[in-house]
Each structure stands twice: as structure tokens, then as C-alpha cells.
Image (cartoon, rainbow, N blue to C red):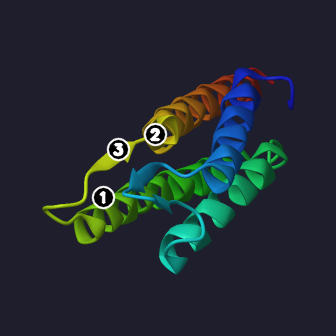
């Protein structure tokens, strides 16, 4: 059932992940922190939207879809941690830093991914209940 609400949630995660790849999330002096700054952040920023997009098309295997969604959620937490580490190690007492709007993409994506997992679980309960009636 590709027309369900979890498809919209996972599509939003994909779009926000692509935006995280395109725009820097902070500026330290004249330098921009983002996709091309540190390779762990770049790998996570590239893998998360791909997995979220692939997760949309696993609608026939809901348990696997929930597991992939949970894995994407874990990767989003690691993306937040790497962004925090990048800010921590790039800051210097004399150089000011400024956050940009893409810094909110990973937390919003995490919430949307958790909502998608919840909706997939509700679908699984409905399908199991319908199977019991047959």
C-alpha cells in the first residue's frame, strides 16, 4: 500500500536528507560546515536519503520496512552526533560560528521516521487482524 501516510513521512525524510547534502548546516568564520567537510557526515548524509527512499518501496514486507526505518533512525542519531562533533572541533575561541537552517533537518527527519515506523506498525496490526477473520 504505497499510498499510505508512512510514504509521505519517508518521502519527507528523503527530501530533508537531500537538502542536508546540498546546504551547509553551519558557518565557522568564512568556512562552511556540511556535506563536503568531514567524510563520516558525508557518508551519513548520502546513505540516509537513499535508504529512506528504498524503504518506501518495501510496503509489501512491513516487518522489513519497520527494521529499515529503525536503522535509518539510528543513522539519523549518528548524523546528529557527527554534526555536533564537527561544531565542537571546529570552534575556536576567537572565531565566531553561526548555525544555518539545515541543522534542523536531522531532528525533524528523526521524528518523521519514528512516525513512519509507528504507521507501519499500525498497518501490520490491521493486516494481521484481517488475516484472523478469514
> Which percent across, then down, holds residue 130?
74, 22
Left/right of residue 99 with respect to residue 65 in the rendered view:
left
* Circle nearer the N terminus (1, 3): 1
> Which percent across, then down, holds residue 105?
52, 39
Left/right of residue 43 with respect to residue 94 in the rendered view:
right
Q: Which residue is mark 2?
A: 100
* Circle nearer the N terminus (2, 1): 1
Q: Which residue is mark 1?
A: 84
Instruction: Please identify, in this view, whether the residue under mark 2 or under mark 1 is nearer the observer.
Output: 2
User: What is the crowding at mark 3: few (fewer than 14 residues within 10 Å), some, or many (at least 20)?
Assistant: few
Q: CA distance from mark 1 to mark 3?
A: 13 Å
User: What is the crowding at mark 2: few (fewer than 14 residues within 10 Å), some, or many (at least 20)?
Assistant: some
Left/right of residue 1 with respect to residue 88 in the rendered view:
right
Residue visible at 62% across and 49% down in the picture: 23
Of helix, strand and loop, which one carries label 3?
A: strand
Q: Say which of 70 and 90 sits in front.
A: 90
Task: Specify the quadrant that holds the C terminus.
Answer: top right
Residue visible at 86% across and 31% down in the picture: 2
> Which percent across, then down, holds residue 99?
38, 42
Marks 3/2 in contact by CB < 8 Å: the verdict is yes
Of helix, strand and loop, which one carries label 2?
A: loop
Q: Which residue is mark 3?
A: 98
Number of labelled discs?
3
Q: Is residue 10 above or below residue 64?
A: above
Q: Which mark is residue 51?
A: none
Amino acid at each position: 500500500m504505497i499510498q499510505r501516510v508512512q510514504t509521505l513521512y519517508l518521502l519527507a525524510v528523503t527530501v530533508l536528507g537531500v537538502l542536508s547534502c546540498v546546504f551547509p548546516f553551519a558557518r565557522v568564520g568564512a568556512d562552511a560546515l556540511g556535506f563536503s567537510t568531514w567524510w563520516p557526515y558525508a557518508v551519513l548524509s548520502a546513505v540516509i536519503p537513499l535508504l529512506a527512499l528504498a524503504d518506501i518501496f518495501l510496503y509489501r514486507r512491513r516487518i522489513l520496512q519497520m527494521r529499515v526505518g529503525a536503522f535509518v533512525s539510528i543513522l539519523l542519531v549518528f548524523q546528529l552526533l557527527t554534526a555536533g562533533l564537527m561544531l565542537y572541533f571546529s570552534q575556536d575561541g576567537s572565531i565566531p560560528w553561526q548555525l544555518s537552517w539545515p541543522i534542523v533537518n536531522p531532528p525533524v527527519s528523526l521524528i518523521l521516521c519514528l512516525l513512519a515506523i509507528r504507521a507501519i506498525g499500525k498497518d501490520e496490526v490491521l493486516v494481521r487482524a484481517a488475516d484472523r477473520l478469514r
